[in-house]
């Protein structure tokens, strides 16, 4: 997020939005090519819990009493991702001055979005430490507090409808903090609180 948005701001400064997308496309394709050079994975022999197919086990876990209360957390994770992937940049651009070009608005939005990556980095370290020290039950309350703060700042920014770099930076930074918290939550729970982690991650 830091590198991608920073790169976008630089490219848009010297070229066009179309060139920005071309550059990102090439980088993504080059990144995908590195998969060819990864060493062959040799799975360790593990004792299978049952001989049923993974699809069936995933479905049974999905509707199990233990997983059902946790599904809203997984659903919210997708909502959080959708907000910062599809909503934040148009929201930031909409609040800018009308005399700015589309390229200038996108450039400023990309610079602001680098703080989303900064929030993810800071939040990952901070929330990981809190989760380890406090446990899942108390960390869930901290997660809710971070979500409430992030939504309050986002709604306030939308209500004011006036772009300032400091305010936009705060919106993105605190959204990154809360997103890292919910990511930490579901990954730890899926990895350690279900008998077969590979199945719980499939859900």
Image (spheres, rainbow, N blue to C red):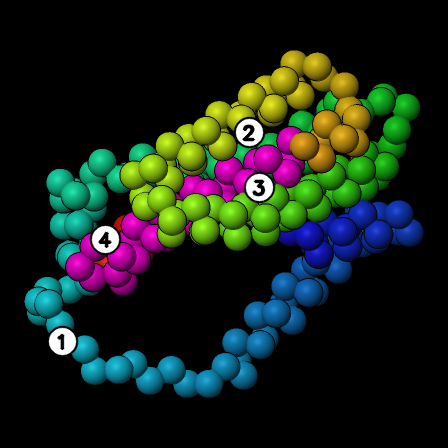
Q: Name the one closer to the observer, 38 or 126.
A: 126
| Residue 196 magenta | yes
Assess disc 3: are there few (<14), some (14-19) or many (≥20) residues with their C-alpha within 10 Å of its C-alpha: many
The answer to whether the residues at label 4 and label 3 have Cβ atoms under 8 Å apart is no
At mark 1, the secondary structure is: loop
Residue occupied by mark 1: 47
Q: Is residue 122 left or right of residue 113?
A: left
Q: Is residue 177 above or below residue 145?
A: below
Residue at 38 percent across and 82 percent down: it is: 41
Chain part drawn in magenta? 171-198
Q: Tell me residue 73's x, y (percent).
A: 34, 38
Q: Is residue 43 above or below residue 170?
A: below
Residue at 43 percent across and 36 percent down: it is: 143
Give the mark nearer the N terminus: 1 vs 4. Answer: 1
Q: Name the one closer to the observer, 167 or 128.
A: 128
Give the mark nearer the N terminus: 1 vs 3. Answer: 1
Residue 193 shows which numbered tag? 4
Residue 176 shows which numbered tag? 3
């Amino acid at each position: 997020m830091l590198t991608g948005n920073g790169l976008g701001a630089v490219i848009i400064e010297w070229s066009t939005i179309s060139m920005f997308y071309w550059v990102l496309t090439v980088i993504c394709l080059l990144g995908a090519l590195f998969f060819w050079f990864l060493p062959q994975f040799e799975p360790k022999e593990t004792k299978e819990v049952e001989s049923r197919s993974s699809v069936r086990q995933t479905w049974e876990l999905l509707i199990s009493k233990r997983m059902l209360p946790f599904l809203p957390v997984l659903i919210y994770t997708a909502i959080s991702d959708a907000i910062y992937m599809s909503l934040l940049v148009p929201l930031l651009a909409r609040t800018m001055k009308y005399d700015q070009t589309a390229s200038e608005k996108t450039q400023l939005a990309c610079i602001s979005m680098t703080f989303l990556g900064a929030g993810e980095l800071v939040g990952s370290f901070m929330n990981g430490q809190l989760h380890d020290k406090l446990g899942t039950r108390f960390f869930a309350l901290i997660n809710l507090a971070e979500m409430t703060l992030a939504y309050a700042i986002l709604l306030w920014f939308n209500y004011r409808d006036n772009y300032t770099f400091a305010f936009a930076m705060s919106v993105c930074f605190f959204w990154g903090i809360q997103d890292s918290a919910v990511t930490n939550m579901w990954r730890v729970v899926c990895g350690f609180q279900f008998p077969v982690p590979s199945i719980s991650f499939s859900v």
